[in-house]
Amino acid sequence: MFSKLFSRLSKDMGIDLGTANTLVFVKDKGIVLNEPSVVALNTRTEEILAVGEEAKKMVGKTPAHIVAIKPLQDGVISDFEVTEKMLRYFIQKTHKETRGFAPRPRVVIGIPMDVTEVERKAVEDATLSAGAREVYLIEEPLAAAIGSRIPIHEPSGFMLVDIGGGTTEIAVISLGGIVSKKSLRLAGNELNENILRYVRENFNILIGEKTAEEIKIKIGSVLPAKEVLGYKIRGRNLLDGLPTETTITNEEAREAILPTITTMIENIISTIEATPPELVADIHERGIMLAGGGALLRGLDTMISQRTRVPVHIVDDPLTAVVRGTGLLLEDIALLKQVKLPSAGL
């Protein structure tokens, strides 16, 4: 009886705990938060100064006693205490609007496929410590497929590639489970590093991660350029240490990111090769679904289609597919119990 009452009163949450961004879905409300996974801490007082967008603005600009931390690396927790504080902030921010008594929420979290039991337990413990009543973990490709309204329980093969900030998740899904898969610890952040390194080696200019990401978003493309686009960059000249500026073209940005893109596509191909023939036939008919922020990279869907000879479709609103899936699972407890990962109680 109390369980049903708590379920009605609590603001159950679905969370996409991403390397780059954390998204929060609240039952009956939809997506209420979409902010960078960054926390600014005062190391003298251990006080949180900012979380999300405000904290991201501080990266690379803080005095010695303030640190802007990204507590997740490659899709997993690298700093347990800061992740707990970040989750607590998001949960409290969501509950702040509630008047009177509100029980602690149930939380569904999407995580990468190949995390270890220790890493899974870190996510569970951090979420419980942050104020959750119950925690359910689901693999991100399944969450993205559910969020994209793909009928995962049909006896048919669906291939989904989720390119996030820290990981690229490649999965073939059938009958509510993952048949073949690959989880790569390279994705959007690796592309930023590619551009940063290219500018350093070819222009002798040191730029920050934020600038590298802006280049990727503004002019990044994986196909040869039909027209030349430029993006003005400012940074520190490595030869004399002074500020300088130059222009990088879209063709140069493409040259920088192409090796990582090629690795991603090779892994998509090898995943198809490891898939049962009947499911490969289904994939050829239905195509490959792209989700995550990386799906928006210009020309990526076309290049994957050319290399695999399979149609490629970008899901609706690929940035929010995972968190929408966690939100739908809050409404369908029977499905949640079927697809959730077992608890990592060690």
Image (tube, rainbow, N blue to C red):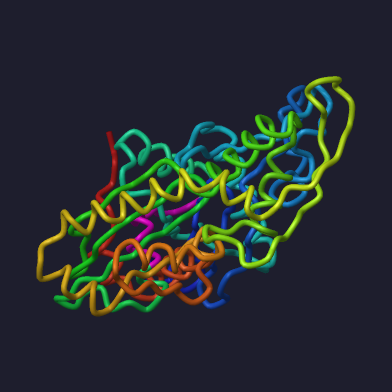
Position of residue 173 in the picture relative to residue 21 (left or right) = left
Residue 11 seen in the figure: no
Residues shaded magenta: 132-144
Image location of residue 322, percent across then percent down: 45, 64
Residue 264 horizontal side relative to residue 41, left or right: left
- Residue drawn at x 29%, y 41% is 344
Say whether residue 205 is left or right of residue 305.
right
The residue nearer to you, when weighing 307 against 90, is 307
At 57% from the left and 40% from the top, the residue drawn is 194
**Residue toward you, 211 or 269:** 269
Q: Can you say which quadrant of the picture contains the N terminus?
A: bottom left
Q: Is residue 138 inside the magenta stretch?
A: yes
Q: Quadrant of residue 138?
A: bottom left
Quarter containing the C terminus = top left
Residue 243, image x, y percentages: 89, 31
Residue 179 in view here: yes
